[in-house]
Image (cartoon, rainbow, N blue to C red):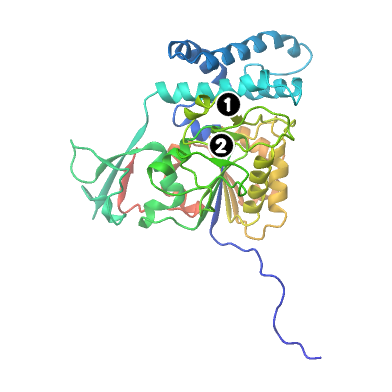
Amino acid sequence: MEESGQDNSPALPLENDHNVYILGAGFSAEGGLPVVSDFLNRMRDSHPWLVQQGRKEEASAIQSVLNFRRKATSATYWTKIDLENIEELFSLASIKSKPDTSGLVSSIRLAIAATIDYTWSTFPQKTIPLIFQADGRRGADARNIFPSVPSWFTKQSNYADGVYDVPLYAYFAGRLLGLFWKGDIVGQNTFITFNYDTLLEDALGIMKIPFGYGFEPDTVQFDETATASQKVQAINILKLHGSVNIESPFLPINTLYKPKVFGSYQQVPKHHAGPDLLPPTWNKRVTTHLQDVWSFAVEQLKTATRIIVVGFSMPATDVHFKYLLGAGLKENISLRQIVFINSDSETVKKRALDIFRGEHVAGKKMTFEDFTFRKYLARMDLTDCIGRPANRATLWHAG
């Protein structure tokens, strides 16, 4: 029998421009939110503010967490547990608690969300100045890049045309999506985040860019205030540890319940429920809707062209990260580069070499940029390597 010459094998899952961004606490720290090392101090700061605001349940949750912190001191006699590290404290509490109890872990979830809300509510909202130019001269209009001046740009009245204030995280999101090249989203973009906050979602909402959370249909409910869509979107924010704007009472793992997605954390306590947060620990009791998100993250990693890790330190408490990458990359034929952006790149490099093969560093397939994310973006030449360049001939200055 003659061969037909046709290849009937399944099409290769090949992508040439799919950026997968993995975001950690360092990404949110740019907006003033606490990182792991100072989270408990910020939680202590939030307590009197919550009392003053009449938010008794959240203040009580913080008091319970701090009481647990005080009583847990004996755990450090034999073991190296840092009780000032909120992730280690959360891990210890989740191991101590039984799956069908709702006390301590529920209090920690609420206390974390309330601390994030306190910080975001009491710290100045950050913007970044953008200066555009034409023919090497300042004073150009943003329309040199965008079809029209975006609604999220605010013209600085004291300056000539071409000088704008932009919400910091809208700028971050715009750069990661490639908007500052020709005004349109470039390539395919997926965000995998370990952060509980909604800084990225709020930014996309301001920019009127639709996004989804990667939930399977009918596994969650969407409140009318939700900015996320329940429909499949081109851009997904996959929150592997949950989110402060998704409510879910602490119930036994097999309890049938549909969490509800709100527009912000402020709606969650009003519905007498706690935020849906998962501790970064080996003892994960992942509920059905988050199992779907983890599975979707694996699928996205299978076709990643580039993986850009921003502000994620790969803590030892979260051993699942290693296996998430292993599951996602074992069938990946598209991956060209992994970029780590972190102001403590030496620590990150050591931890990365516990996960990845060392020859990828020598071969420049894996690089480490020793910057905060904002400073990394200020070096516009560096963003070329992640396939999301900015139009340097027009965008003269940011920050």
Q: Quadrant of residue 288?
A: top right
Q: Which residue is mark 1?
A: 273
In the image, is residue 141 above or below residue 85?
below
Residue 299 point in image, percent of width and height: 65, 53
Q: Which residue is mark 2?
A: 260
- C-beta proximity under 8 Å, tags 2 and 1: yes
Local SS, label 2 = strand
Quarter containing the N terminus: bottom right
Local SS, label 1 = loop
| Amino acid at circle 1 | Ala
Kindly give the residue lying farthest to the bottom in the view shown. 1
Disc 2 versus disc 1: distance between alpha carbons? 10 Å
Q: Residue at x 57, y 17 (%)?
A: 40
Quarter containing the C terminus: top left
Q: Quadrant of residue 377?
A: top left
In the image, is residue 290 above or below residue 317?
below
Q: Residue at x 57, y 53 (%)?
A: 306
